[in-house]
Image (cartoon, rainbow, N blue to C red):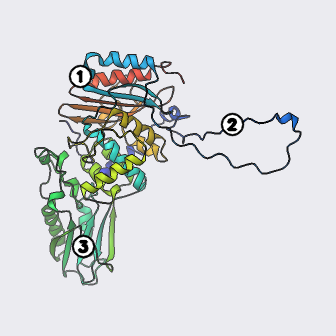
Amino acid sequence: MTHPPLTTARRLGPLLLGFPPLILPLLAGTALAQPPARSAVSVPGPDLAELGPAPMATLPPPPPAVGLPLLQGQVSCGPLQQRLQATLAGASGGWSVSIADSRGRLLAEVNGLTPRVPASNQKLVSTAYALDRLGPDYRLSTRLWRLPDGSFRLTGEGDPDLALPQLQRFAKLALGSGGSSGPPGTSVRLELAEEPRQQWWPSGWNPADRTYAYGAPITRLAVTSNAIHDAVMNPPSRLQTLLQRAVDQQGGQAQLALVSARNPLPADAVLLHEEPSAPMHNLLSLANSESHNFTAEVLMRQAAGSWDLAQAQRRTQDWLMAQSLPMQGVRIADGSGLDRANRLTSRFLAALLMRMDQHPYGRNYLASMAVAGQRGTLRNLYNGSSLQGQFYGKTGTLTGVRAISGVLLTAEGPRYVSAISNGAGNPNTVIGQVLRASQTPGLCPL
């Protein structure tokens, strides 16, 4: 299994604020650049010339907006279908591929309803859910509270970029240098609100993965995403060590205690200080462009409003159902794709990409993805080809699994392409061939 180096959210900002200047003209006139058009209903009527001048009157209200297009269930582009079948040839049993356009036409497909292990293509689900539910300006927060008895509590939402400078500020405030009523140097009690150990890893994650940085535990107070070179196996213990060191540097004393994040704050707790994460578009890009598992897991939990994974799974599934997506065979096991119990279909992913492209926050979603030959986990793929800079997508890799799904910009509008291989050979080459076939002009006329 290959994974990109750990990159924190705040370092991604300059890359993620929009599309490269050369891409913007290509988006004009497509669903990527504007909301879907409203459809008008034409009603036959008398010849206006026979009626004479029209009387002064208010016009009737416009017809209601037509709903977003649904992905069709039948293939409608024979030439592209033939090219797809020829590309997969005898290996088609290990592939699921779906190609659609912005009108909801299913242009070509092979095994589109076969559930597959999606690997990190699962992040397309958790990031879409988070963007829809939380919005593009949302930030994760880490907060210091003063409790009625004079003690303090530190709460968090899983900021992947939480680091020592923030901890030093919290320690200084808790010791009375800007928030507490006690004099500097006073011994304070500081509670650290955290999830129980049994919730740190999704149960389906392979124990061998949990020792690596990409399999780090999912906790609310996660300094550097609970990873150094490898995973930090006991995040609360590390946090206590770092906070104690920060307290000592301030010349104070503190009693640090671990409490359950499931315990509600007292109604009269006072917020002393808040450290926000980078904004949502940075978090989305960390999850999608850099395929950061920790961030994807946190986003799904925050979008669901629950850090109970089973409840977050159910709420994610309910949201997907509400989007009128083809849900046959879909199973949500985690937010990152590291759990092999996840099941998605290529038709589902193509429909999700189409839906999100026409979402009010569609540009934020697209801008969070890797770019062929340029950025993220696609930076080294399809360099120098017609795909470079034209395909915005999400990769996925597990042993025996390779998946790439995303939005391909073409002269005839966007193409939503999902290709999932479970056991097929040379997957990157085959996916490149599928994408280039999807670029061919004139195959699928409007």
Q: Which of 188 and 351 is in front in this view?
A: 351
Query: What amino acid is labelled 3 in the image?
Result: Arg
Reading the chain from its start, which is encountered first: label 2 or label 3? 2
Report the Cα–Cα distance between label 2 and label 3: 63 Å
Residue at 73% x, 49% y is 60
Name which quarter of the figure residue 285 lies in: top left
Query: What amino acid is labelled 2 in the image?
Result: Ser
Numbered label attached to residue 153: 3
Q: Residues within 10 Å of mark 2 (few under 14, many from 20)?
A: few
Numbered label attached to residue 426: 1
Residue 167 makes an appearance in the image? yes
Q: Nearer the viewer, residue 120 or 155?
A: 120
Q: How crowded is mark 3: few (under 14 residues within 10 Å), some or many (20 or more)?
A: many
Task: Say which element carries label 1.
Answer: loop
User: Residue 446 location in percent, x, y?
Assistant: 54, 24
Residue at 45% x, 34% y is 71
User: Residue 391 location in percent, x, y?
Assistant: 39, 31
Q: How crowded is mark 1: few (under 14 residues within 10 Å), some or many (20 or more)?
A: few
Of discs 2 and 3, which sits in the foreground? 2
Q: Looking at the figure, which quarter contains the N terminus?
A: top left
Reading the chain from its start, which is encountered first: label 2 or label 1? 2
Question: Is residue 73 found left or right of 306 in the rendered image?
Answer: right
Reading the chain from its start, which is encountered first: label 3 or label 1? 3
User: Residue 250 location in percent, x, y?
Assistant: 20, 73
Question: Is residue 409 found left or right of 329 in the rendered image?
Answer: right
Assess whether mark 1 and mark 3 are in contact (beta carbons under 8 angstroms): no
Task: Say which element carries label 3.
Answer: strand
Residue at 27% x, 51% y is 297
Query: What amino acid is labelled 1 in the image?
Result: Asn
Q: Which residue is labeled 2 in the image?
A: 42
User: Residue 405 location in percent, x, y?
Assistant: 34, 34
